Image (cartoon, rainbow, N blue to C red):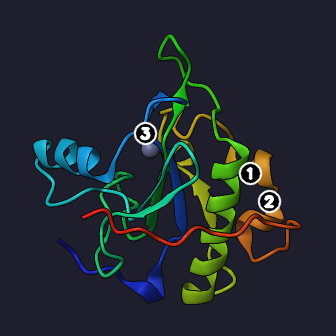
């Protein structure tokens, strides 16, 4: 796996797992699925569970495997993103959103306040993460550290293995 170039980090790219909102997906299952696709490890650096749990995926020492041509970025996926028919739907819950915003805060503390927040669909014709990131949080927040107001506490990052 290629080392992450932290100085040239593109930003944080949000994905969804394209599973139903109530379907729990584990790091282990995604890791197995991604390995079956020939990747060395889970493609995302973080996974946000259906209840807002934050799980560590691929080590941030390495580039991700989540966005073609834009993998020198931190990949985060939330569990969900499709409706009962498997069609794209914004299923990001309040709890998942809170976890993501706290994670962004933490990552901006590590990589810099101007670390961008982007959605997979900004780089691909895919619907992922099933909403427009800029529309949801605003262009200002997506470009730099902006306080969006009170946040729920971040659950401890759990390493599933
Ligand atoms: Zn994606």
Q: Residues within 10 Å of mark 2 (few under 14, many from 20)?
A: some
**Camera-side residue: 63 or 26?**
26
Question: Mark 1 or mark 3, which has the lower sequence index?
Answer: 3
Q: Residues within 10 Å of mark 3 (few under 14, many from 20)?
A: many
**Viewer-nearest of discs 1 and 3:** 3
How much space separates mark 2 and mark 3, taking CA atoms?
A: 24 Å
Q: Position of residue 37 (x, y in %)?
A: 15, 42
Figure check: 92 above or below 73: above
How much space separates mark 1 and mark 3, taking CA atoms?
A: 20 Å
Residue under label 2, please give it.
Answer: 139
**Camera-side residue: 94 or 38?**
94
Which image quarter holds the N terminus? bottom left
**Viewer-nearest of discs 2 and 3:** 3
Q: Are marks 1 and 2 in contact (CB under 8 Å)?
A: yes
Q: Are marks 2 and 3 in contact (CB under 8 Å)?
A: no
Residue under label 1, please give it.
Answer: 134
Q: Residues within 10 Å of mark 1 (few under 14, many from 20)?
A: some
Q: Position of residue 132 (x, y in %)?
A: 69, 42
How much space separates mark 1 and mark 2, taking CA atoms?
A: 5 Å
Q: Position of residue 108 (x, y in %)?
A: 62, 81
Question: Mark 1 or mark 2, which has the lower sequence index?
Answer: 1
**Disc sitting over residue 17 in the figure:** 3
Image point (28%, 76%), residue name: 62
Image point (50%, 71%), residue name: 10
Residue closest to the far top: 85
Q: Is mark 1 within 8 Å of ligand 1?
A: no
Q: Is mark 3 within 8 Å of ligand 1?
A: no
Which image quarter holds the C terminus? bottom left
**Disc sitting over residue 119 in the figure:** none
Question: Mark 2 or mark 3, which has the lower sequence index?
Answer: 3
């Amino acid at each position: 796996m290629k080392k992450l170039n932290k100085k040239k980090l593109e930003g944080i790219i949000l994905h969804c797992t394209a599973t139903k909102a109530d379907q729990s997906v584990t790091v282990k299952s995604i890791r197995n699925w991604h390995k079956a696709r020939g990747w060395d490890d889970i493609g995302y650096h973080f996974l946000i569970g259906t209840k807002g749990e934050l799980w560590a995926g691929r080590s941030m020492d390495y580039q991700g495997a989540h966005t073609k041509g834009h993998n020198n970025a931190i990949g985060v996926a939330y569990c969900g993103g499709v409706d009962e028919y498997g069609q794209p739907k914004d299923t990001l819950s309040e709890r998942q959103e809170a976890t993501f915003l706290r994670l962004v805060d933490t990552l901006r503390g590590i990589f810099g306040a101007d670390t961008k927040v982007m959605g997979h669909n900004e780089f691909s014709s895919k619907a992922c993460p099933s909403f427009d990131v800029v529309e949801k949080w605003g262009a200002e927040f997506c470009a730099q550290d902006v306080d969006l107001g009170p946040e729920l506490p971040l659950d401890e990052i759990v390493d599933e293995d």
